[in-house]
Image (cartoon, helix red, strand yellow):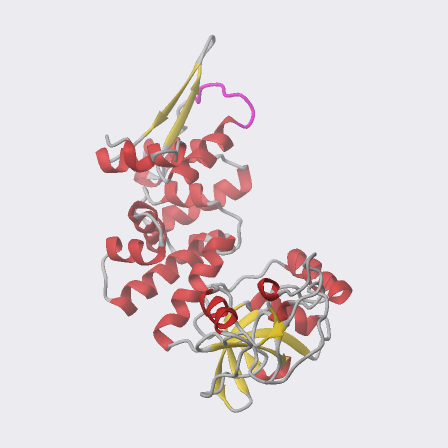
Amino acid sequence: MNAQAPRRGLGRGLGSLIPTAPPTPVPAPVADEDVNRDAQNSDFAAGATSSATADPRSTGSENGAQIADSALAPVDGAYFAELPVEQISPNAVNPRTVFDEEAMAELVHSIKEIGLLQPVVVRRTAADSYELVMGERRWRATQAAGLATIPAIVRETDDTDMLRDALLENLHRSNLNPLEEAAAYQQLLEDFSCTHDELAQRIGRSRPQISNTLRLLKLSPAVQRRVAAGVLSAGHARALLGVGDADQQDRLAQRVVAEGISVRGLEEIVAVGDGAGGTTPRPRRAKPQAPGLGELSERLGDRLETRVKIDLGKAKGKISIEFANTGDLQRIVDLIDPRNRNDRPI
């Protein structure tokens, strides 16, 4: 057993917690059984077999400042490494295709100043070749910053898991536009040969959200391009789904952009049958609304994954929330008040 001099526990960085080389079949010897058992039970236990890392529970000093080093058990199928940027290729099935230029510029500046704080996740495809699983935006920014290497977690990932993992990371970060999200759902349904309910369970999304998002793929290509570019919101896109004709969808989308029509206003235009007979009838006179009320209604609808209507009268207001059945109602109640969600069945 190689003994090392005690050292301080702070300032060792992420590399101390993740192995810096692929794990070997022969485990490294440890100081004692207790330390080995603690390392194996840790959720983030990892360590290179060629170097020792410190375990604060094995301290021999009274004040805990001095800690003895011992080798941590490596994580099966994963290790940490500084990889050359040019050896990494992007994820071919990454659902994210649009990267905000302003946000990218900010990340590039941050990396130049303090470096990349969160490693990317890659898988090995050849001896000196890797493919991104998560973190394409960080990889692109590192390239733009002129860095030669990038911190990475190398792990084993099957082809069938590549899209799922990339999708989940972007969903958790809210990085996908509605069309990217819909296309990813559609590909997962085809890859897994599963139903909307089964996909919802696999990725932790509600079935109505998946179904409503997939409906956006029925929009005309011109409208889809506007949604992907952020010109039309998801609320506008859902309202346009009420128009069956693709040309009429395009005309209404152009009006929304040119006239700044709100989601509620677009819903009223669609409701009165805009475009029937080749003419555009005058929409019904909308009730006066307080500034921002339509936007608030849209935000609530997106949050609750259903249609929300806010009416403001002279003395009081009213919020109407639509639901499909008692199960959908329970889902909405849980979103509004998540406390004791399993103890209050409807």
Quadrant for residue 306, please give it: top left
- Whether residue 339 is visible, yes or no, is yes
Q: Residue at the spot x=74%, y=62% of the render? A: 109
Specify whether residue 291 is painted magenta.
Answer: yes
Q: In the rendering, at what x and y percent does residue 199 appear?
A: 29, 58
Q: In which quarter of the image is the C terminus?
A: top left
Quadrant for residue 280, please give it: top left
Q: In the rendering, at what x and y percent does residue 255 appear?
A: 48, 41
- Whether residue 325 is visible, yes or no, is no
Q: In this view, does 344 lie to the left or right of 21?
A: left
Q: Residue at the spot x=68%, y=79% of the render? A: 4
In this view, 93 is above or below 216? below
Residue closest to the eye, 201 or 259: 201
Mark count: 0
Q: Residue at the spot x=53%, y=48% of the render? A: 231
Q: Is the magenta stretch mostly helix, strand or loop?
A: loop
Q: What span is in magenta?
A: 285-292
In this view, 173 is above or below 82? above
The residue positioned farthest toward the bottom in the image shown: 127
In this view, 93 is above or below 269? below
Q: In the rendering, at what x and y percent does residue 142 appear?
A: 67, 71
Q: Is residue 211 left or right of residue 120?
A: left
Q: Is residue 55 left or right of residue 340?
A: right
The residue positioned farthest toward the top in the image shown: 315
Specify whether residue 330 is painted magenta.
Answer: no
Residue closest to the eye, 8 or 180: 8
Q: In the rendering, at what x and y percent does residue 256 appear?
A: 49, 41
Q: Residue at the spot x=53%, y=43% of the render? A: 257
Q: Quadrant of the N terminus?
A: bottom right
